[in-house]
Every structure is written in structure tokens, then in C-alpha cells.
Amino acid sequence: DIQMTQSPSTLSASVEDRVTITCRASQSFSRWLAWYQQKPGKAPKLLIYEASSLESGVPSRFSGNGSGTEFTLTISSLQPDDFATYFCQQYNTYRTFGQGTKVEIK
Amino acid sequence: QVQLVQSGAEVKKPGASVKVSCKASGFTFINYGFSWVRQAPGQGLEWLGLISAYNGRTDYAQKLQGRVTMTTDTSTSTVYMELRSLKSDDTAVYYCARDLGGQPGDYWGQGTLVTVSS
């Protein structure tokens, strides 16, 4: 099974900050990596698929990058609505989620 | 519009089984696969398995092999997830999600809380 290690587990930031979350995979793969945003009591929302493709309707301040064993999600200018928990998911072999990163207000 | 509507909350005793449904609408059901994902209270997301609505092929997380069965009913565009021999640590919100290979999890159900308690 491919294990996904996400960091940091918690990130404190201010509005308009640039933030980056990293996911490292236990095995290399090309681009089958997705990023989700989840708010309390809600289902996850797809932000990025195929490592860097922006899901329809998602603001362009969200971007994804990476291949191999290291992938990143960047929010270029953090907005109040972005304080949430973010998860990566590999779907190269079955599916595995990272542990999550909570983005909180500094 | 695309919708996935799940069945209501369940309370079960240890050792029992639970079957959660997920009714799809707004798209061609047999063109998609569906993943089931759960989230224990205050915890992260755990992928449980995937079923193809086209041919019923399933892939299950190794951790749940032998305890979980996913099925579809194409006549009603409904996906089912049955979990047997329930334990207290199966207490979680269970989600279904549309899963199309290259674009997994683009639509999700609202979640179903399953509580396992004696």
C-alpha cells in the first residue's frame, strides 16, 4: 500500500499569507494525486486532481504541484473562507489519504 | 444537478451489521465508480473501497477485507456499503463519493453517522 505523509499537521497563518502544504508518498507515482478541503460537519470538497488540475469552480489562488514522491498544495493569498482542514489523496494504487493539515487563524 | 443522497444515521450493537445506501441522480450512473470513505470522530479520512457501477468490480481496503461488501443497484442508481461484525472503533461518519479514475471525489454524499455501542 502507498502511505501518504502530510505536513504540517497544523498551520497557523493570517489572511493574505501564502501557505504551502506538503504530501510525501512512500512510493513514487506520476500525477494521481488529489487535494480536498473539509470544513467541520461537512463532506470534503475536491480542489485539485491529477496533482495540478484545478477543479471547476475552485478559486485560482489554489494550486497543486509535484510528482514522484513529493506533492504540494499552495494557497497564494489565504482568505477567511480558507480556514479549514486539507487532505491529500493518492489514487495511483487504490486510494490513500494523508493525515490532514488544519489551517487555523494566527 | 448531481446529487448523492445517503441513508440516515444508524445505531448498532457490537457484532451486528450495517448497510448504508447512497442514491445517485443527475448523471449517468453506470459511467462511474463510487468510493466509500469514513471519518471517525475528530480523525482523518479513511478510504474503505471502490465499486464500479459499470461491472460491479470492487476493490477493498486491506484492513476491512472480509468485513465489507459494496454493491450497486443500477435500476435505482443506488450504491450500498455493508459492514459486518461491527466494533466500537467502526463508529464514524461514512461517506460515498463519485470516483471517476482521473477525477476522484468530485461529488460526495452528505454522510451517514454509524454509532456502534452496547
Image (cartoon, rainbow, N blue to C red):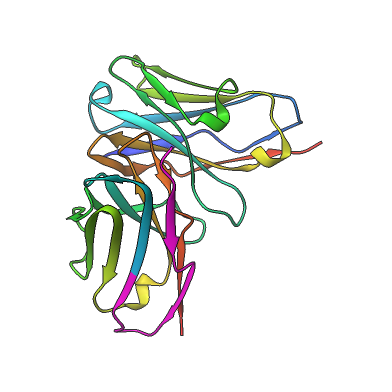
Bounds of the magenta segment:
A1-20
Please state if A80 lies on the left or on the right of A8 as rendered: left
Find residue B32 and report its horizontal and vertical position in percent: 27, 28
Q: Residue furthest right?
A: B118
Choose top left, top right, bottom left or bottom right for residue B11: top right
What residue is at 49 percent from the left and 56 percent from the top? A99
**Residue nearest the viewer, comparing B27 with A24:** A24
Q: Is residue A58 visible?
A: no
**Residue drawn at point x = 37 percent, y = 58 percent:** A23
Q: Nearer the viewer, residue A68 or A51?
A: A68
Whether A84 is among the magenta residues is: no
- Location of the C terminus of chain B (image quadrant): top right
The foreground one among B2 and A2 is A2
Q: Residue furthest front?
A: A27
x%, y% of residue A9?
49, 67
Is residue A101 placed above or below A44 in the rendered structure? below
